[in-house]
Image: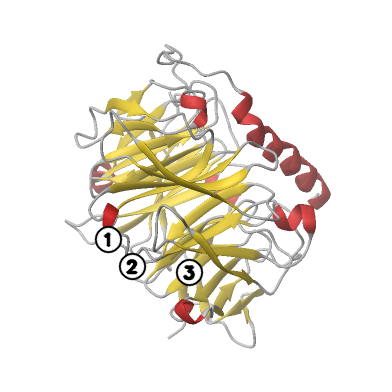
Amino acid sequence: MRKTYFLFFVILIFISCNKYEFEIINEAIISDQIIDTPSSVTDPPLIQTPNSEIKKCEGGYANGYPCKGMDLYNQITLSEFKSSFANDNWGWTDRDTGKEYVIQGLNDGTAFIDISDPLNPIILGKLSVSTPSTWRDIKVFKNHAFIVSEAIDHGLQIFDLTRLREVNEFKEFIPDKRYNVFGSAHNIAINEATGYAYIVGSQRYSGGPIFIDINDPKNPEEVGGYRNMGYSHDAQIVVYHGLDENFTGKEIYIGSNSDGGSNNKIVVVDVTDKNNPQLISTKSYSGSGYAHQSWLSSNHKFLFFGDELDEYYYGGNTKTYVFDMSDLSAPEMKLIYEGSTNAIDHNGYVVGGLFYLSNYTAGLRVIDISQIENNSMDEVMFFDTYPESDLSSFDGVWNAYPFFQSGIVAISDGQGGLFLVKPSD
């Protein structure tokens, strides 16, 4: 079965890599096809997955999973989701109630889980689709989830998360809004400071970003886009407060761009003026396979960048490329951090002095970056949801959401489903 998954995901990732070949589409992609209407079924009771006690990380294992400094609170399997694959996830904290929720991407839709009691998470419902896809991406802004997928004619699904407050039985949801100015897309990034969403990896703007104003979440408005840098696989957009005073207070787009071959790079664009975005710089790097995703340090000085196919093509241990962004016009490679396994890296996020890396077959790795000025990075915690191997394959952890104030980290494992873990006391 592992070999089957391996071949399947190798084929799928090369399909994704070739999206730059798609024709530029200048007009909005509009479809009357409703792909997210649920089947007519009676809502079952809420699905609760009791665990009753924390599975402590002791002797290097927690409930059979290799670990270091992280305890297991619960796992929701794919069978409990009634799905066959888990992909991206994100989180939402209801400021009115203090409750925390996981928004879990699946091959056949999106599930909503109340994790306020992480030992007893509750699956509140599912936003199902009739066109499955391996790829789904989710972000949250103003109490709304924004969801894209590579499914044909998917568009942008917008779901009002405050609806979850009243759920007392399992629901098959429909979105509050479907915005169809594009069909499929690989990813969505949101700058919460300005209220703009950036759709990347669609058939428009050569796969570059579509700018959408979502300050009124249920009434999004396309305001522009940028095609001159080519296909972006992922992006982070910030109001810049780093060392380069030329761009202080500007809205800066940092994309992970690939043409599907050897042309892999980070791109830096000033998107403050949506009608006139300006390319600041591009930076390529040696040994590239496929530019995948990156995240800035809290002070915007360093960029932690991942290439999804370097380990697969060239072997060696997991690599994280660290760029010095002190001069946005001329980013410089600072160091290449190597992990302890041969696993492929996927998404990574910075929380304070820690870098949370989704590392496929090696699970979640947590790396201390507090001494990055001294060229030092040190793995301090991990939780391996895929103990079968640490090979360079696409099994295991796709994403991990580390931003909950409770300290719970929501790990999305393609084969294992959702894991709720937390640093040990």
Measured as percent of width and height from the top left, residue 398 is found at 58, 53
What residue is disc 3 on? 355
> Which SS class for mark 3?
strand
Q: Nearer the viewer, mark 3 or mark 1?
A: 1
Separation of marks 3 and 2 at Cα, in angstroms = 14 Å
Q: Are marks 3 and 1 in contact (CB under 8 Å)?
A: no
Residue 316 appears left or right of 277 = right
Which residue is at a point 69% across and 43% down the rendered structure image?
A: 262
> Which SS class for mark 1?
loop
Q: Pick the residue in front: 151 or 182.
A: 182
Label 1 crowd (10 A; few <14 / some 14-19 / many >=20) = some
Measured as percent of width and height from the top left, residue 142 is found at 23, 45
Measured as percent of width and height from the top left, residue 417 is found at 57, 54
Which residue is at a point 67% across and 55% down the rendered structure image?
A: 286
Sequence-wise, the earlier of marks 3 and 1 is 1
Vertical position of residue 404 compared to residue 19: above or below = below
What residue is disc 1 on? 241
Measured as percent of width and height from the top left, residue 7 is found at 80, 43
The type of residue carrying mark 1 is: His
Question: In the image, which disc is placed on residue 299?
Answer: 2
Colour mode? secondary structure
Q: Pick the residue in front: 9 or 23.
A: 23
Sequence-wise, the earlier of marks 2 and 1 is 1
Separation of marks 2 and 1 at Cα, in angstroms = 7 Å
Residue 276 appears left or right of 311 = left
